[in-house]
Image (cartoon, helix red, strand yellow):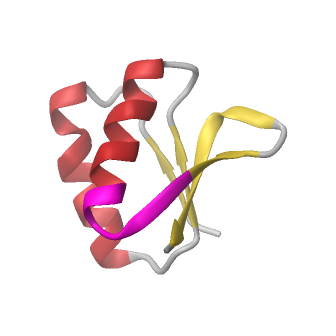
Amino acid sequence: MKVIDLHGVIHEDVETVLDHACRTYAAPFYVITGHSTRMKELVSIYITSRGFIACPAIGNQGRLVINEK
């Protein structure tokens, strides 16, 4: 499964990184957010707007699993 690591990505650039990931990779894929609540919110908002869903990965609260609806 493809992994998108957002460590070091500023909040303003999250949409650009996720846009590329959504166009390039098939779901499911992981997005590593770390434990930042704000980063998880930004990812969830964008992913939902693109018709995907974001769920916390089992056993690792620092990453989200992106799936198709």
Which quadrant holds residue 2? bottom right
How many marks the image carries: the answer is 0
Of 60 and 52, nearer the camera is: 52
x%, y% of residue 58? 80, 45
Which quadrant holds residue 6? top left
At 38% from the left edge and 21% from the top edge, which residue is drawn?
38
x%, y% of residue 21? 35, 64
Is 49 within the magenta? Answer: yes
x%, y% of residue 49? 25, 59
x%, y% of residue 4? 47, 52
Residue furthest to the right in view is 59
Q: Is residue 58 above or below residue 37?
A: below
Say left or right for 53 vs 12. right
Q: Is residue 56 above or below residue 69?
A: above
Residue furthest to the bottom in view is 26
Which quadrant holds residue 56? top right
Say left or right for 4 vs 51. right
Is 29 within the magenta? Answer: no
Which image quarter holds the N terminus? bottom right
At 60% from the left edge and 50% from the top edge, which residue is drawn?
55
At 76% from the left edge and 36% from the top edge, which residue is drawn?
60
Query: Residues in magenta?
Result: 48-54
Of 21 and 51, nearer the camera is: 51
